[in-house]
Image (cartoon, rainbow, N blue to C red):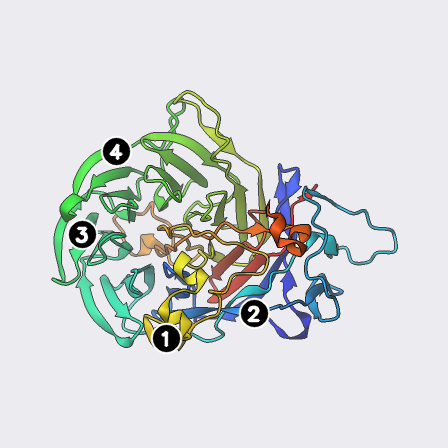
Amino acid sequence: MNGGGCGPERAKVRQYGKSCKELSALYMSQDIRAHHGSIWAVRFSLDGRYLASAGEDRVIHVWQVSEAECKGELLVLGEEGNLNLCSESPEPLVGLDGGYLERRKRGKGSNHRKSVSLDQIAVPEHVFSLSEKPVCSFRGHLDDVLDLSWSKSLQLLSSSMDKTVRLWNMSSSTCLKIFSHSDYVTSIQFNPVDDRYFISGSLDAKVRIWSIPDRKVVDWNDLHEMVTAACYTPDGQEALVGSHKGTCRLYSTADNKLQEKRLIDLENKKKKSHLKKITGFQFAPGSSTEVLVTSADSRIRVIDGVDLVHKFKGFRNTSSQISASLTANGKYVICASEDSHVYVWRYDRDSRPNRSRDTVTVTQSYEHFHCQNVSVAIPWPGLSASDSIGTDEGQRNGTNPQLPGRKSTGLERPYRYMNGTNGSAHHKRTSSVNGINLSTFHKRTPSLNSNPFSDRVSATWPEEKLVASANRRSPQSGGELSRPAWGMVVLTAGLGGEIRVFQNFGLPVRI
């Protein structure tokens, strides 16, 4: 785990096609050796307090989100661009001028080429941190764990190459229920409205709705194509299902019955191309029609209703189960890549021009940073609104209401310089690079030269706003400077079993 005297380690962020760098001071604050072997699945709980991780070693670990206090101390730059604590400085917030910060030109005497000037850095009172050790671990799967899903009551589903889905509860280390399938289970999700039910997708080409209390399938549908992605719409009344052939279908799930409604076209109407397998879905925060679709042709698409409206390019996903995720404010798309980098695109939904149905916006400008053998990259979803204001009875007495006797993280206290607004946690899936070749599993589909199907994670985070130093000195003056990338937490997992935490303390800088 990263720590000690050197402080957080700066990550070098490069930009392409942008006139402004938004991740101007991104630091890796933790590097946890979490698993033996590749991590395929990572998911934050819906309240943002816990992280579940799983993969090749068949073990599911649950980590608690905690805090590291910076209290009034200023992080100053070390020789390698790392951050160190200096308790002598009274001002933890520097250089907010209400607009973009111009990069300062350094004299010839400067030998810190990797450093960031202090007027570009703002440090909150508390920064994101994961527990050094898991708070609980679940064992029982007989093969790689491919996907995870949390319920609102902190129950956890896991799917595996051992052809089962298992139900776990943090109050018990034993498996509560097993749901058997006839092939690898690639994707699962609790019904977001009624978590007595869940949906599963499998390489046996079937999508199923399960009743947890009855431990049985209540309905199913055969796609005649291996299912590689499945998720509910936010209201639980419909589901999207993607296949290894690149088809995307919308089903009605009213009354927990699967009824196909339509085939969604992911191609440009003017230019037909060969579709590749669907690797993940995520609905845009606050929308029941706008969904992010990741596929193994190195493309991320946004579908609004039945129309293709946006594409993101630049990352590499040709054979993996990598999937992109939207931040909770919907302003950024984050995705791992087969080239050992994490990519971040700005997504200006509100400024989308009026256009004909055949016009598709393409975003090719992005920022990216190196993360060796990354298989998953997701933003922290933030704490739910009830947790963030600390009014829950369990928080008042210092315990988590779902976990009697367990102390709260302390993150329910508002950040000094952040005012988080909650976004609902949506379904996301992400991961798998150079791992296990699916063609060795299924000789009948030699085209599937990819690795284990992998994970889905809640991919939202609270919109964070930075208070100007003038307003901080005079709280009554009102007004905040919106810095949507400031404070962003990106969590990655890798093929070596590591979990890394990155956080941006930088303000926007003109290039």
Q: CA distance from mark 1 to mark 2?
A: 21 Å
N-terminal-most mark, 3 or 1? 1
N-terminal-most mark, 4 or 2? 2
N-terminal-most mark, 1 or 2? 2
N-terminal-most mark, 3 or 4? 3
Q: Residue 19 in the image: state x and y as whole percent.
A: 66, 37
Q: Is residue 148 left or right of residue 26?
A: left
The residue singled out by tag 1 in the image is: 136
Residue 108 against residue 20 in the figure, above or below: below
Residue type of the residue flagged with mark 2: Ala
Q: Is residue 222 left or right of residue 173?
A: left
Labels 1 and 2 touching (C-beta < 8 A): no
Q: Secondary structure at mark 4?
A: strand
Q: Secondary structure at mark 2?
A: strand
The residue singled out by tag 4 in the image is: 263
Can residue 116 be seen from the camera position used here?
no
The residue singled out by tag 2 in the image is: 68
Q: Which mark is residue 209?
A: 3
